[in-house]
Each structure stands twice: as C-alpha cells, then as structure tokens.
Image (cartoon, grey):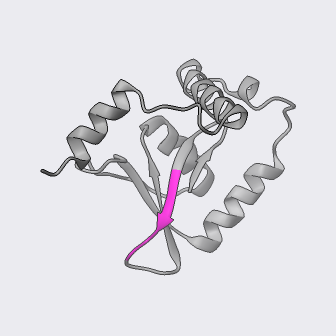
C-alpha cells in the first residue's frame, strides 16, 4: 500500500519474517526521518533495494500512529498543506495522472520513461 501524507510518502508491505510487523519503505531519507519522529524508531539504509530507507514496525503501532496522524488533519486542501516544494510537485504530478485516470481510464498511455523501465527490468529474452 502506498501512503502519501503532507510530510512523507511510504510503501507498506508485510514483513516476510514476522506476520505481526509491517515493513515501511521510503524513497527519501527526509521522509524516513519525518516518519521516524512519529514512531521514535530507527530506519535502515539498504542501497541495493528499490526503496533505500526501511523500517520494521509492529502492525498495531503503525495503525495507532497513523490514526493519530490522521486525527491531526486540519487543512481543507491537501496539496496546499505540503511544505516541501519538490515533494509538492511530485504529489501534483500524481494528482494530474489520477485526474486523467478519473476522466478516462483508457486515456493513459505508457510513456517513453515507462517503456524504458519495462524494457530494462522486465524484458527477459
């Protein structure tokens, strides 16, 4: 699951070694640090992984922390609540893509960047 907050973006998956934990993954150290402030846990750096910054956390703790985080929402516009200009632009791009998807689910075509990515990682001739 992907979660985009106004402070961080993360990917949450099951910890394959512990059914009671999640693996929370971040692409940005800034985002890992923002989440770390909420949970007071250390994150690991794995330069060989697709998500470089990683943290293991009990499921109950993640759910509790995110619930409190959501209860603190006090803004009427999500994008306007993002302080980091670079992250704001990323979220705006996501907004535009999802808006296009809303208007016409068939309108999105795979672009050159995606074609290059798929060619590099999935073409296993």
Residue at the limit of the structure toward the bottom, as seen here = 19
Instruction: Please state the horizontal and vertical placement of residue 113, each as a whole percent of the image.
Output: 35, 27
Q: Which residue is nearer to you in this view: 117 or 80? A: 117
Work out which quarter of the rendered image holds the N terminus and state it. Answer: bottom right
Span colored in magenta = 11-16
Residue 68: % across, % down: 76, 56
Could you tell me residue 55's position as x and y percent?
44, 58
Q: Residue furthest top?
A: 85
Question: Closer to the camera, 69 or 111?
Answer: 111
Instruction: Reply above or below: 96 against 70.
Output: above
Q: Foreground: 28 or 111? A: 111
**x and y percent of residue 20 in the render?**
53, 79
The answer to whether 75 appears left or right of 112 in the picture is right
Near-viewer residue (48 or 69): 48
Q: Give the residue at x 58% y 40%.
A: 8
> Does residue 47 lie above or below 104 as drawn?
below
From the viewer's perspective, is 54 left or right of 73? left
Judge whether residue 69 is colored magenta: no
Q: At 63% from the left edge and 24% from the top edge, which residue is drawn?
A: 92
- Count of residue discs: 0
Residue at image x 24%, y 39%?
A: 119
Residue 122 against residue 80 in the figure, above or below: below
Extreme front residue here?
A: 106
Q: Main secondary structure of the magenta part?
A: strand
Q: Is residue 114 left or right of residue 31?
A: left
Residue 76 quadrant: top right
């Amino acid at each position: 699951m992907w979660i985009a907050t106004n402070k961080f973006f993360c990917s949450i998956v099951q910890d394959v070694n512990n059914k009671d934990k999640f693996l929370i993954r971040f692409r940005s150290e800034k985002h890992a640090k923002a989440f770390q402030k909420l949970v007071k846990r250390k994150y690991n750096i794995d330069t060989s992984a697709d998500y470089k910054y990683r943290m293991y956390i009990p499921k109950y703790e993640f759910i509790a922390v995110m619930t409190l985080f959501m209860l603190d929402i006090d803004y009427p516009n999500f994008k306007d609540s993002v302080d980091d200009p670079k992250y704001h632009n990323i979220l705006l791009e996501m907004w535009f893509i999802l808006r296009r998807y809303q208007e016409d689910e068939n309108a999105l075509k795979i672009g050159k960047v995606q074609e290059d990515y798929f060619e590099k990682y999935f073409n296993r001739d």
